[in-house]
Amino acid sequence: MPVRMRARAHTHDSSTDPPPSHNSENNNTSELESDHQVDSDKDKSDNDETYKQGGGEEAEGDQGEDDGQEDEEDELEDDSDLDPEIRMQAQNACAPVWQPWQDRLLIVQVNADHLFLMPRCSRMAAWNGTADVLAVSSVQQGQNSYFICSGEACKAHFNYLKKKYKADQARSLQKTGMDEEVNEFMELLGDCCLLLDSETASSSHTMQKKIDLEAQAGIELRDVSMRGLVCGDRLVDVASLASAITQERQGQRGQKRKGRDDEMENTSQSRNTTCKRRYEEQHAQQMGILNKLADCVQGLNYRISGMQDEQEKTNRYLHQQELEHREEAVWHRKKELGIHM
């Protein structure tokens, strides 16, 4: 900008003054060069100041990053005070890929516990117990083989293995291990998948049965609502299902009261049946004892009769012997007296 102003001034002077000579043109050129030099020096000084300020800001940024790293290190050191579940989730997030021997340990434990056959309310606790068992069993695999995982991680990895088995890719995951171990792993994994599929099919059948019964009950209720009063015993009772919810059971007031009466009647009948069965058992036991006692008495009678017969025989024998001794004594006496018979 200053260069242009000065050039215009020189142009104005040249219009009024006589034509310049060669020396005046040289002077004008030197003045323009000096002005350019001043401007360049000024820009350079401004750039130096800006560079110094930027360097200070960069230094401050580096210092801030160092402080941030120190804060992160302090946070990592304070992780020991965190909740165990949070630390477990962090370890699972940073955990390496499951090893083949870990897959085999997981499948063996799952096949032993049958976790997928347990009620839904207790499955997560069972998976956590499986994770604890795996942590203990992994120590027996050798040095540096200890690993920690949560129940959620075990469940997710089992689902992954099941998916790979159905895609015929489970054997490719076993890159290490003997053939016997791999074959056992494949067999146990197949058994688990078969049991899980059968359980899923059974639950699906039960659910479909409930849906069909509810649909039939809805159709009957729609038809009955257009007729008026009907006998409720002929309608489908949704509360009779084992999977009926509490609201469905409470909605049947009459059925509930009738069911209570039936329950009391069944209870009394069961009590009478129990008492009758106990009486019959006691009677049979007493009859058995009496029969045994009668057999013993009859045996004693037989023995007594035998002893009486022997006693009579003995008495007859003794009486016969006594008669013979008397006759012999009489004969000797007569012989001594000289009496001839």
Image (cartoon, rainbow, N blue to C red):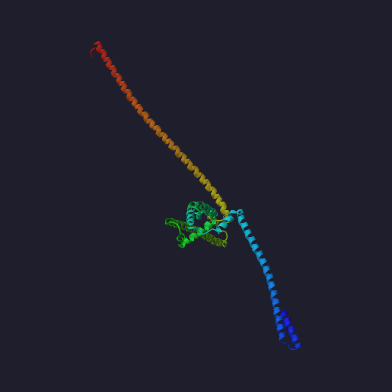
Residue 182 in which image quadrant: bottom left
Instruction: Give the residue at the far left of this rendering.
Output: 340
Instruction: Give the residue at the far front of this rendering.
Output: 23
Residue for point 45% across, 38% down: 285
Q: Position of residue 74 (x, y in %)?
A: 63, 56
Tally the numbered discs: 0
Relative placement, left or right, of 117 versus 53 is left
Residue for point 52% across, 48% down: 266
Q: Position of residue 200 (x, y in %)?
A: 49, 58
Check the image and report above or below for 302 versus 215.
above
Check the image and report above or below for 132 versus 168.
above
Relative placement, left or right, of 11 versus 194 is right
Q: Position of residue 318 (x, y in %)?
A: 32, 21
Q: Position of residue 131 (x, y in %)?
A: 52, 54
Residue for point 60% across, 53% down: 80
Residue 35 in which image quadrant: bottom right
Q: Is residue 161 visible?
A: yes
Relative placement, left or right, of 294 versus 255 is left
Name the one closer to the observer, 340 or 298.
298
